[in-house]
Every structure is written in structure tokens, then in C-alpha cells.
Image (cartoon, rainbow, N blue to C red):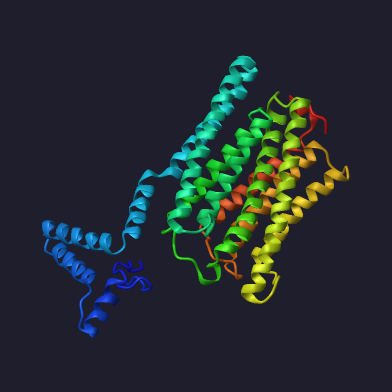
């Protein structure tokens, strides 16, 4: 565990230092930093089990920080409040409630009539909006605390992917009030926050940026754009999964609903194609500035290109009449596999200039997710006699 940087600088352009380094520096210089004195007294009081002395020195230390850097202390207290509030956990719980609610609306549609189903769907939509509001506040607070754009590491990318999908789901549900967008976006919102929660167990989620990433401009352009491309591709795949499951296991997928769902999938894929392509090009420009080459066949770069290609494949297959509803849905689900590989799979290789968030403990869950997506794709080939609903392709 790294020693905390507990000794503040004496000048505005100075750096925080660990206690041990600051103590030795002060000994060599023959001077004593006030913070070093208070920290040393804290340690002495703790070893002697002197609670009153310890608390007195803590108050003196924090008082010194309040006086010398009030802005930093305000932000620190806000960060403590932010961590205690667990807003992402709260948003995740509300997403789950929205998911359960919309599933109940589908059940009510077949058993209790459309009136009851619509009321439950409306309640689920309200829950989705509430979850998005909490999620938005949490993302905004992280941005303020870090002084950075919303995506700076693997943890924040999971948070942002879920947020973007949920926001898009709110607008799509307004356009197509079928409950499908609620189900798809709530699934992504809850799922990505679960992923983020597990990533956060590895340590600090607001760590210092690596030098090559220390550019707010490129974090706000390339990183945001490519992450939005991931989010849109996942949302298209989630909507397609809802269609495939509904087509096979329920009577809900009428021809009208089928056309509406496929229109949603197609529209989201169009945005995913645009965002992933622009994000990849911007990444190449950043790579040229940082490493002196636009493209180096890095695993992360290859993954980004594959996301562009899978979205282009879906669009060309549709425009060329090669696939219809089931085919588009199957390809959109395949987009989930490609995107999760680009997002997480390339980090598990441990090679390449983009392997900032190396992780190998998630390989089982990655494999399980990929297997589930292949199963969903298989539903597109289910014989018509297995489908209780109606289909047009």
C-alpha cells in the first residue's frame, strides 16, 4: 500500500509529500513543517493510546489545512460526503426496480389487460428517470472532484457507459412507449454500475492521471466520443436482445411492436457507427501527437476498429436487404461481443500502449457474457413454431 501524501506544500506551486519523506527533508534542512509536527504527535498519541491527545492533534492538523488551503478542504469534505452517500449504489438499486417493474408490466399485459400494464410501465419509467437523475448527479460530482471530464479510467468508463445508455433510454421510451427501452437501458445501467462497483474494489477510483493521458482536451473529445460509441452499441444490442427473447418466449412481439423495436435498434446503430468512427479517428490523431504514429495495430486500436466494422456491417446488411428483423437483431447482439472485447478484453492481454487498466480476474465473467450473447443470437434462428408471437422476418 502506498504511503499517503499527508504533508501539504508550503507554496502554491509545491507538491504534497508522504510523511516519511517530509520528516527526513525537515531533519536535513533543520526546519520543522507544522504538519509534520502534528502528524508525529498523532502517531505518538496513538502508540500511547492517548485518545484526547490524538484528537487534539487531528483538530490542529485539519485547522492548519483549513487555513492554508480552504478550497482543497471544501472539496475533500464533499468527496467524503460523496463516498458516504453511495449515489452509484442507489442509482443501481433504482435501475433494478425499474427493470423489475417493466417486467411486471409485460406480465400484466398478458394477464390483467393493457390498463394495468400501462400504469406499471409508467411507474417503471418514473423509476428510470429517478435513477438517471441520481446517476447524473453522481457523475457531475465526480467531474467536479477530479476536475476532469467524466471518463478517466476503466471504472469511470463503466459508470459513463451506463449513464449514457440510460439517458438515451429515457428519450427512446418517450418516442416509443413500449417498455422495451426501459428494459434495455435499465439492464445496462444496473449492469455497468455492478461492473464499476467491482472495479472500485481494487482501490482509488480517482487516482492521478498517467502522463500520456493528462490532457483534458483529448479526454473530453476522443475518450468521451469512443465511450459514447460503446454505450450506443451496447444499447442497440440490449434492445435486440429484448426483441429476440420476447419473440420466442412471449406473445408480446406483434408486427407493430417488431417494427418499432427494429427501428429503435437501427437508429441507435446509426449513432453508434458515427460515434465509434469519429472517436477512433480522434484517437488516431491523439496517438500521432503522443507516440508519433496515427495507427500502430495496438489491441485497443484494433478493438475500436472492430466496433466500427460491426456497426458498418449491420447498416450495410440492412441497406442491402441481406437481413431483416431477426438478422438485424442477431448482428446487434454480436455488437455486444465485439464491444466488450474492445472495452475489457484487450486489457486482459497485458500488452499494448492502451493497457492502462490491466485486469485478469474478470476473464470468467467476460467469457460468461460472451457465451450468453451467442445464446441470444441463436434465438434468432429458432424455428417459427417455437415463437408464440408473430414475426415478419
**Residue at 59% over, 52% down:** 366
Horizontally, is 95 left or right of 182 in the view? left
Q: Nearer the viewer, residue 247 or 16?
A: 16
Quarter containing the C terminus: top right
Horizontally, is 43 left or right of 243 in the view? left
Horizontally, is 381 left or right of 99 in the view? right
Q: Quadrant of residue 254?
A: top right
Does the image show residue 184?
no
Residue 387 screen position, x and y as percent: 75, 28
Q: Nearer the viewer, residue 371 or 208?
A: 208
Residue 221 screen position, x and y as percent: 62, 59
Q: Is residue 112 above or below residue 293?
A: above
Q: Quadrant of residue 373?
A: top right
Q: Is residue 177 above or below residue 305?
A: above
Q: Nearer the viewer, residue 328 or 53?
A: 53
**Residue at 27% over, 59% down:** 66
**Residue at 71% over, 35% down:** 244
Q: Is residue 88 above or below residue 127?
A: below
Residue 199 screen position, x and y as percent: 48, 54
Residue 206 screen position, x and y as percent: 44, 59
Quarter containing the N terminus: bottom left
Amino acid at each position: 500500500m502506498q504511503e499517503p501524501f499527508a504533508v501539504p506544500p508550503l507554496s502554491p506551486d509545491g507538491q504534497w509529500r508522504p510523511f516519511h519523506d517530509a520528516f527526513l527533508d525537515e531533519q536535513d534542512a533543520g526546519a520543522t513543517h507544522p504538519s509534520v509536527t502534528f502528524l508525529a504527535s498523532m502517531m505518538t498519541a496513538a502508540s500511547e493510546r492517548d485518545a484526547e491527545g490524538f484528537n487534539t492533534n487531528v483538530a490542529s492538523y485539519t485547522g492548519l489545512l483549513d487555513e492554508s488551503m480552504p478550497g482543497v478542504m471544501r472539496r475533500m469534505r464533499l468527496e467524503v460526503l460523496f463516498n458516504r452517500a453511495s449515489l452509484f449504489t442507489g442509482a443501481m438499486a433504482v435501475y433494478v426496480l425499474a427493470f423489475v417493474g417493466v417486467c411486471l408490466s409485460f406480465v400484466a399485459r398478458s394477464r390483467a389487460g393493457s390498463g394495468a400494464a400501462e400504469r406499471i410501465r409508467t411507474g417503471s419509467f418514473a423509476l428510470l428517470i429517478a435513477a438517471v437523475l441520481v446517476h447524473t448527479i453522481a457523475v457531475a460530482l465526480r467531474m467536479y472532484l477530479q476536475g476532469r471530464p467524466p471518463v478517466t479510467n476503466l471504472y469511470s468508463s463503466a459508470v459513463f457507459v451506463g449513464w449514457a445508455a440510460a439517458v438515451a433510454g429515457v428519450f427512446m421510451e418517450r418516442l416509443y412507449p413500449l417498455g422495451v427501452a426501459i428494459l434495455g437501458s435499465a439492464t445496462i445501467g444496473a449492469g455497468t454500475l455492478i461492473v464499476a462497483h467491482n472495479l472500485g474494489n481494487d482501490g482509488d477510483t480517482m487516482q492521478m492521471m498517467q502522463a500520456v493521458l493528462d490532457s483534458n482536451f483529448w479526454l473530453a473529445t476522443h475518450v468521451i466520443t469512443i465511450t459514447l460509441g460503446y454505450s450506443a452499441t451496447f444499447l442497440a444490442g440490449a434492445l435486440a436482445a429484448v426483441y429476440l427473447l420476447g419473440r420466442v418466449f412471449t406473445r408480446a412481439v406483434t408486427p407493430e411492436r417488431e417494427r418499432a423495436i427494429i427501428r429503435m435498434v437501427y437508429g441507435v446503430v446509426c449513432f453508434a457507427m458515427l460515434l465509434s468512427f469519429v472517436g477512433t479517428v480522434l484517437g488516431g490523431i491523439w496517438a500521432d501527437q503522443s507516440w508519433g504514429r496515427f495507427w500502430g495495430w495496438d489491441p485497443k486500436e484494433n478493438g475500436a476498429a472492430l466496433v466500427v466494422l460491426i456497426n458498418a456491417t449491420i447498416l450495410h446488411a440492412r441497406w442491402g436487404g441481406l437481413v431483416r428483423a431477426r438478422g438485424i437483431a442477431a448482428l446487434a447482439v454480436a455488437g455486444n461481443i465485439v464491444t466488450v472485447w474492445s472495452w475489457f478484453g484487450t486489457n486482459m492481454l497485458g500488452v499494448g500502449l492502451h493497457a492502462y487498466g490491466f485486469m485478469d480476474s474478470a476473464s470468467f465473467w467476460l467469457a460468461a457474457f460472451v457465451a450468453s450473447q451467442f445464446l441470444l443470437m441463436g434465438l434468432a434462428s429458432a424455428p417459427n413454431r417455437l415463437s408464440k408471437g408473430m414475426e415478419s422476418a
